[in-house]
Amino acid sequence: MVMNKAQMADSISKDEAQLVKDLRRRDPMAVAELYNTYADRIYSLVFNQVDRNREVAQDIVQETFVAALKSAARFRGHSKIYTWLCSIANKKVSDFYRHQKRQAKYQTTKALELDQLGGETLAADPGESGERQEVTRQVLFSLPLHYRQVLILKYVEEMPVLEISQIMGRSPKSIEGLLTRARNELRTKLTTRSEG
Amino acid sequence: MADFTSEDEIKELLKSACQPATPSPELKSQQLQDLVRGVGSTAYGVTRPRWRQPRLGVSIAAAVISVVIGYGIWLGQAMGATLVP
């Protein structure tokens, strides 16, 4: 497969290529390096996609790294390692909602779970900004999963469209369209909430 | 709340709603141990194409050798038959 300039710029660095080589050799030090470098970022990404459910996020992070180790031999280095891991994590999140059919359940019980789990997330600020965070969170979690994923990758992870397209397995053009629809939906719901 | 028209405002809203979170150190340590243990066993073995898997490769090689030998025998008999006056 021939890479274009943008893809070349976004492809793997020498250090990352060495890490992937070591992963293919199943070197435990390479596994530790991969995990220690990316576990926090992948956890945070997943955590924000699964309605901030800690247990689900932990399971999905574990599955993501296991899948990455299993498929290291097939990783061709056309994207950064983080992009590759994000793409696996995104698929795992989609699988979670598709196969377990828990989306509705988690949306309706989210408030209860947050109370029970408490813990490691940064607590919402009290007062107006805390309320705004909570409303935004509720609206975000009420969006379809692919809208939520694209918005988080674009605005929270601050990834360029090309990288998002690699993660979501769509063309950059399709990602731009998806982003527009997701933004519009978010705006509409936020406006409705702020007016109501 | 504002009218959410600007990109910056959406970014600010989403960033504040989706603040970074980290797993507990105990969990990370446990997960890492599991991964390293898995890599040490055959659990995360390199996936080879089916035709490169040893058992299948041996079977295919045996089949090819049998066909070659069989063809040789058949050819020998056929040639022998044509040479008979």
Image (tube, grey):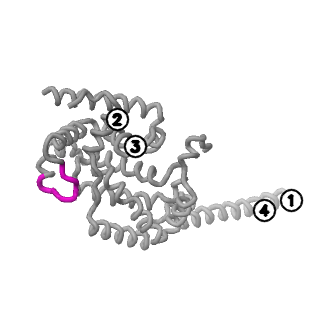
Q: Can you tell which mark lies on residue B76? A: 4
Residue B62 falls in which quadrant of the image?
bottom right
On residue B83, the disc is: 1
Disc 1 from disc 2: Cα separation: 92 Å
Q: Chain of mark 2?
A: B
Crowdedness near tag 4: few (<14), some (14–19) or many (≥20) residues, C-alpha within 10 Å? few
Q: Secondary structure at mark 2?
A: helix
Q: CA distance from mark 3 to mark 2?
A: 12 Å
Q: Is residue A50 left or right of residue A69?
A: left
Label tally: 4
Give the chain of mark 3: A
Quadrant of res A158: top left
Disc number lying in front (4 or 1): 4
Viewport quadrant of the C terminus of chain B: bottom right
What amino acid type should be assigned to the residue bearing mark 2?
Answer: Asp
Residue bearing the label numbered 3? A158
Circle 3: element type = loop
